Amino acid sequence: MPITKYVFITGGVLSSLGKGIATASLGLLLKQRGFSVTALKFDPYINVDPGTMNPYQHGEVYVTDDGAETDLDLGHYERFIDITTSRLNNTTTGQVYHEVIQRERKGYYLGKTVQVIPHITDEIKRRMTIFDGQHDIVLIEIGGTVGDIESLPFLEAARQLCLERGSQNTLNIHLTYVPYIRSAGEVKTKPTQHSVKVLMESGIRPDILLCRTEQRLGRDIRAKIALFCNVEEEAVIEALDVENIYEVPQMFARRGLDMIVLRKLGLQGKPLRMERWNRFVRRIKNPRYVLTIAFIGKYTQYWDSYKSILEALTHAGAVVNARVVVRWVSAEELSLNGTADHPLSDTDGILVAPGFGSRGVEGKIAAAGYARRSNIPYFGICLGMQCAIIEFARNVCNWQGAHSAEFARTAYNVIDLLPEQRRVKQKGGTMRLGAYPCVVRKGTKAWQAYGQELVYERHRHRYEVNPEFLPALQEHGLVVSGTSPDGRLVEIVELAHHRWFVGVQFHPEFKSRVPAGHPLFVHFLRAALRYQQRRLEGVEVVTSVV
Ligand code: GLN
């Protein structure tokens, strides 16, 4: 059993400095040095999980195999470190209090006053050490910015763990910001000094500083930060802005971050092996083709909401040798226009995003119809598949007013709640969540992509294709190319006489990894590339069919 080493990653000065990417990048470097690594995220908010928050509040909700709705940083961990996370990898203040209060009600603490220290901090430490002995290194990212009231118990738990495990087995990395002040023409270290001071008030002394900056930090600046923040000079690491997040591990490797971490933890490690990663980065930076994909969603101003889909497009792009340019199309504007023609013409593929609630849904349905009629490659994810079916029901089957029961009760609720969901009363954590098996039908486009009969994909939805209408939908030509093993739940649909029109009830984006990508995204982009080439060769004229 290995002695597990713990690396804490905190952030200062301001949020959005890329703590998740920094954690994931370090995880990759340590794994490529031959260690078994996992990463945990601790979020200071009181929601039990982000499942009930909207994307403006939280960005994407990332779903794990075991059905936890988690922080999007877990997606970075999976994609960079190539690990499979679970509900044990993400803890919120809400979960910690929930657990402690339940225990109190059971009489576990009889006679005692239940307090933040030690009861809350003990529960946090229990969660921080849940993989003790199972991995060489556990990275622990603490959400928020030091100085926030909410994150104090997490910092206190980290401090206690450092004391208990000793300095050979624990390490503190602090991510800060070193702004460049244009009028003065220089970078300023004061915010970093303040941030470290605040961190030290919690009893945590940083061993390594990662300094986010737009400008190169000269030796003198790093020496100044080192002196004022009480950190070794070589442990003050410049984290320069890079063009692409996948370059962050390379940048850290150039600055020797892995070596410093291993030295401080008293570990040796194998030589760093980054060939595969470097090859992938070269491919995404120098693609042969450019593909334009129309992305129809509600949060087109807020890309974090669709993080995993965007990453999956990047991965698949590397496989087909193309840069994917996303053309953001607001679903609501499409519905207001009443016509889907304009923003969707002249694209190589159309992707309709997942979503909840009726806002923008008519636009998504219009986009699916446009793709179906114009023979443009279409990929509908979750709500994107449901909208494709609604469109098919309305315009191919001629079922007037066909809709999902999520939005309207009609005679043709082709998407509806199944009995197990009708019984559900609570909103949090009660959707169909996590990995479920899907049987892929031979001879379909889905089969061409997967090349195997049984696949597992992650879900996050309440509504399903209504089995009552399925035979009629199929008679009208809808191909069901994937179902649950018992055949009851529709998982993948497609159109036979279309170039590539596939809708999936699940979220394939959560399982896309470097460098192979996800087969459905890869095949979607292949179809988009073929379509683009045929247009360029003039074999095909784009027809806009109303
Ligand atoms: N709102 C739909 C449902 O609950 C689709 C969800 C989604 O796109 N993730 O079934």
Image (cartoon, rainbow, N blue to C red):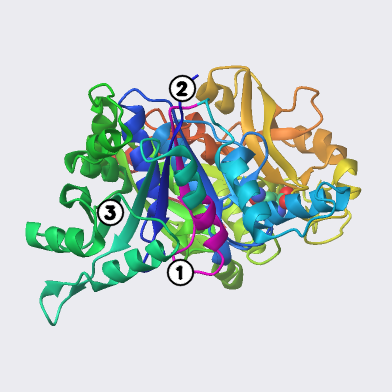
Is residue 303 depicted above or below 247 in this figure?
below
Residue 270: percent from the left, percent from the top? 26, 21
Any mark on residue 2, and which? 2
| Observer able to see residue 151 | no
Decide if residue 219 is on the left or right side of residue 363. left
User: Is residue 497 in the magenta section?
Assistant: no
Report, in whole angstroms, how far the alpha carbon at label 2 lies from the one at label 1.
34 Å
Q: Point out the image quarter for the C terminus.
A: bottom right
Which of discs 3 and 2 lies nearer the camera? The answer is 2
Q: Position of residue 240 (x, y in %)?
A: 21, 55
Tell me where residue 433 sits by quadrant. Answer: top right
Mark 1 sits on what residue? 147
Q: Earlier in the sequence, mark 1 or mark 3?
A: 1
**Span of residues in magenta:** 135-157
Spatial CA distance of label 1 from label 3 is 18 Å
**Label whose residue precedes the other's in the sequence (2 or 1):** 2
Q: Residue at x 52, y 25 (%)?
A: 134
| Horizontal side, residue 89 vs residue 425: left or right | left
- Mark 3 to mark 2 CA distance (whole Å): 28 Å
Residue 280 vertical position relative to residue 246 in the rendered view, above or below: above
Tag 2: amino acid: Pro
Q: Residue at x 67, y 40 (%)?
A: 459
Q: Nearer the viewer, residue 367 or 217?
A: 217
Label located before the other in sequence (3 or 2): 2
As drawn, the label of residue 210 is: 3
The answer to whether any part of residue 265 appears in the image is yes
